[in-house]
Image (spheres, coloured by chain):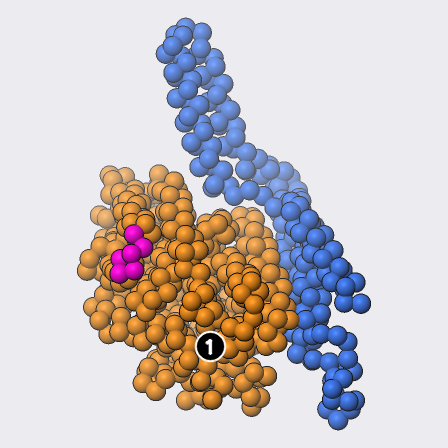
Amino acid sequence: MTVVLAATAAVLFGCGTFLLLQRQLTRVLVGLALLSHGANLLIVLAAGPPGEPTFVGEGRRSALLDPLPQAFVLTAIVITFGVTSFLLALAYRSWLLTGDDEVQDDVEDRLIATRWSAAEELADAEEAAAAVHGDDLDHHDSTLDGGEARRRAPGERAPDDEVRR
Amino acid sequence: MSALLALPITLPLAAAAVSIVVGRWRTAQRVIGVATLSALVVVSIGLLVHVDRDGAVASQAGGWDAPFGITLIADRLAAVMLVVSLLMLLAVLLYAIGQGEAERAHVGFHPVYLVLAAGVSAAFLTGDLFNLFVSFEVMLTASYVLITLGGRRDQVRAGMTYVVISLVASALFLTTLGFVYASAGTVNLADLAGRFTDLPVGVRQALALLLLVVFGIKAAVFPLFFWLPDSYPTAPTAVTAVFAGLLTKVGVYAIIRTQTILLPADDRPAALLLAIAGATMVVGVLGAIAQNDIKRILSFHIVSQIGYMIMGLGFFTVAGVAGAVLYVVHHIIVKTTLFLTGGLVEHRAGTGHLDRLGGLVRTVPVVAVLFLLPALSLAGIPPLSGFVAKFALVDAGLADGWWLVVAASLLVSILTLFSMTKIWAGAFWGAREPSPGGRPLPALMVAPTAALTALSLGVALFAGPLYALSERAASDLLDGETYVQAVLGE
């Protein structure tokens, strides 16, 4: 029985981890739920082999089950429930704001990354222009445009938003 | 005295409940929040004095004896952390009331803030690994709400990352608890201290490593720091300041606590911790140099500074851990002040982007002073508090011959100074007057910032007694005997 439960915990952890790596918040949410179920199962297993219910004055003392892990799991389940409902609300809010619940990149981070690569491309283009002179000017411009376009990318859904409201 | 031990947890929770009930009446909410935190500051200072004089105080919730019931314990480290945290929470609450941005935006700000205070206090005072998990959850759930309180687009985006990462860490914590209970049969820290030594070396090290990963995510050490600079800057200033000053430091506290009490002296992961510390310092400061926004620069500096604390712990000598404790105290105060000053700049100029700032030293010289002092302190310029703390750490490191990590820490100090100069040159110097007609600064925003700056000067001024206190706390930690005796009473 313990082996089956341990295997179940392993499957829960595996599926949970896979779902965590998805981009949609709802999938991440299900993944987190699976993960915490796995952890709870593990704690129940930590109580040892099955025994009799723990009530004072009932059952044989030696056969009683360790009640502490069950108290742990109960607490953990309540906490997970609360936080999961918060995440659901967050996912709903994200859906209201952006039209989907995909977790987006760090905008500022991307800005800094593009700033450097744009500067590098500009330097490269200037070098090329210096080497060839003449007809490299177009190339120079196009790299600049590319940089500009990517810099705008994070906010590109903004017009959609206005329409939806 | 042990009756007072539960007060920092129960009082803010009760006050939060009342605060919700009177939600329509903001003045009442403010009075409740400020009065509660002020009372707790007094209680915690009393606790610190008592604990420092008479040794650790423990109390068993509900009268159930130690290994079975829930233990609350205040030793020197916990008491010091409690005093500094509550002072900081009080100052930031006043600042938030003065600023009005987050505080006026939602009726839930005050209750959630008080719940956060309860969670932080509980994390410091608990003597039980599972209860530590619960305190972390209380604290984090409050922080989830605070970070997304406005419900703006960027807040929701950053909040998602923050919440999901925290939840993964929590699930991992729960798993670790299962393993600990399965192998040792208890989650009481004092009881665990005895039983951990009997475990096979492999199991013991695996459990210690798992705990390190769990708390490492919360404390944002390398390589588990990536969520922090992404999520912190989007929250309102007051919220970011609390997060920056407190939340990661609760993680550091948990690392210090578990790595000292659970592991026997000859089996502590010194080299591993020092490697992590070095990488955290260097990567954090390099990240900060690349940034261009005041809050983001400061967020990366949190990561970098965490490295110093882990370094002090990694020496595992009394001097090293004492340096780490002193550093945590200095850092909580200085980092909060810097974020509050960053908020002052944003409030005044309407932006935190260095490209769009300039000339603030002429328009608001007070803010310039309030930035300069903690910034120099952060970099470790004598005679400010950062110098004292860093000197203690470097001295401890050289005494044990850890040259490489000490050299890294000194190099990082210089780079810290460099990126602080970047903020200074970008925001305060320069000819450009920031955006047309800057807003006036409310006195209630400036006063708490100034008070915290004065406090950090106080840390430098009373460095001797403070270091002696840290040393006593450190020898308690490394010995572990006093802690176990206070809880189990043998």
Q: Residue furthest top?
A: A134
Residue to which mark 1 is pinned: B125
- In the image, what residue occupies the spot 49% across and 86% down? B488
Chain letter, blue: A
- Where is residue B238, by image quadrant? bottom left
The amino acid sitting under disc 1 is Leu
Q: Which residues are magenta?
A: B398-403
Q: Is residue B9 visible?
A: no
Q: Residue B156 in the image: state x and y as whole percent.
A: 57, 51
Q: Is residue A154 magenta?
A: no
Q: Nearer the viewer, residue B116 or B321?
A: B321
Give the left or right position of residue B419, taking residue B163 as reference.
left
Look at 49% across and 18% down and name the residue there.
A142
| Chain label for disc 1 | B
Residue closest to the eye, A6 or B426: A6
Q: Position of residue B325 (x, y in %)?
A: 35, 67
| Residue at image location 38% in from the left, 10% down from the top | A131
User: How many C-alpha atoms fall within 10 Å of the one at disc 1: few (<14), some, or many (≥20)?
Assistant: many
Q: Is residue B208 visible?
A: yes
The hue in which chain B appears in the rendered picture of the protein: orange
Element on which disc 1 rests: helix
